[in-house]
Image (cartoon, rainbow, N blue to C red):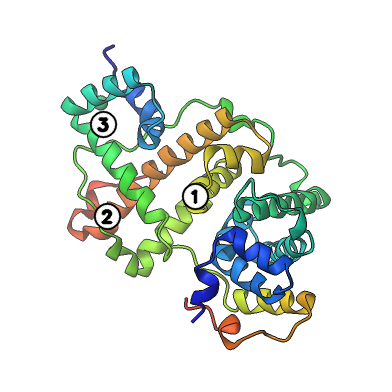
Amino acid sequence: MNDEAENRTELELIAAILGGQKHLYHALVRPVEKKIFMVVLAYVHNPSDAEDIVQEAFLDGYRHLASFRGEARFSSWITTIALNKARARMKRSAAHAEVSLDDAGDEDRAPAVSPALLRDWREIPSEALERNEVRTLIRQAVSELPESYRTVFVLRELEELSGEETAAALGISLALVKVRLHRARIQLQKTLAPALRSATEPHRKNRWPSWS
Amino acid sequence: MELNCRHVWEFLSGYLDDTLDAAVREDVERHLAHCEVCSAILDSTRNILVLTADDRVFELPVGFSDRLHARLNELIGEEPASPDMTRPDPT
Ligand SMILES: [Zn+2]
């Protein structure tokens, strides 16, 4: 096992890497690589592009490690590098010419989404995630969020960045982060509350004829 | 202040993050105490967020970690330092 490396704090690891124990960079990367990939994937929506960008971001992170000041967490620093790369790539891509994540899109001016109305909610335990069908429902619901909501949602909920870190990584205001996160959550509740209830309580399937 | 259901929905996210002003939070709680619909919406939202953030939901592409660390090794220019550094991703 890798206990020695895992027990060190980020800053201790970075100091050791800069001091010549270069191979410890792997131990710095491993705990955050999945989260960084999720964030970039939410942004570019293409797994192979996302993988390229994540690799480049971690390579850059290594090259510029001496300039990491420890004011942010390593993961939010790498996130900023990765999202800059994703942005640059999307600007080059004609297909994404219309998309700008940094502007308040139409979604932000759109009327608020209403949640799915329920009278009671029976807790769905996380064991339900053992079922592929349940995982697929959730992945689909997240991937169907408007792009600007999805990126904020993934940074806040999956990468667990703070509101301030998310705002900094995306170059938007904290207020906009809050609006988008709120709407992403309500949208997911609207889609997933009926869908997950049907999927986990088969005998109630017909109570939800439509959840569009 | 007496809140209706729509007001409460607008405060849902702030309520979950505990970023509401104390007075607003009290108003929301007073509403939740007697509104089963808003309580169910809150419970389902909280439940769904926990499920969504679970590590099992989103998976890395097969071989992602191996490819990443192989590229890092090229840059770092060292032989894999020790066996534990090259252990396969447990997922
Ligand atoms: Zn209500």
Please give the chain letter of the residue carrying mark 3.
B
Is A38 left, or right, of A138 in this rendering? right
Please tell me whether mark 1 or mark 3 is closer to you in this view: 1
Cα distance in 3D space between marks 3 and 2 = 20 Å
Cα distance in 3D space between marks 1 and 2 = 29 Å
Quadrant of res A198: bottom left
> Callout 1: few (<14), some (14-19), or many (20+) C-alpha neighbours within 10 Å?
some
Kindly identify which residue carries mark 1.
Answer: A160
| Mark nearer the N terminus (1 vs 2) | 1
Same subunit, tags 3 and 2? no
> Callout 2: few (<14), some (14-19), or many (20+) C-alpha neighbours within 10 Å?
some
Residue nearest the viewer, comparing A26 with B17: A26
Same subunit, tags 1 and 3? no
Please give the chain letter of the residue carrying mark 2.
A
Kindly identify which residue carries mark 2.
Answer: A198
**Rendered location of residue A127, percent (x, y):** 28, 65
Residue nearest the viewer, comparing B55 with A111: B55
Give, as a three-letter code, the residue at label 1.
Glu
Give, as a three-letter code, the residue at label 3.
Cys
Ligand 1 within 8 Å of disc 1? The answer is: no
Please give the chain letter of the residue carrying mark 1.
A
Give, as a three-letter code, the residue at label 2.
Ser
Q: Residue at x 43, y 41 (%)?
A: A185
Please tell me whether mark 3 or mark 2 is closer to you in this view: 3
Cα distance in 3D space between marks 1 and 3 = 26 Å
- SS for callout 2: helix
Say which mark, if any, is on residue B38.
Answer: 3
Residue that protrudes farthest toward the right in the picture: A92
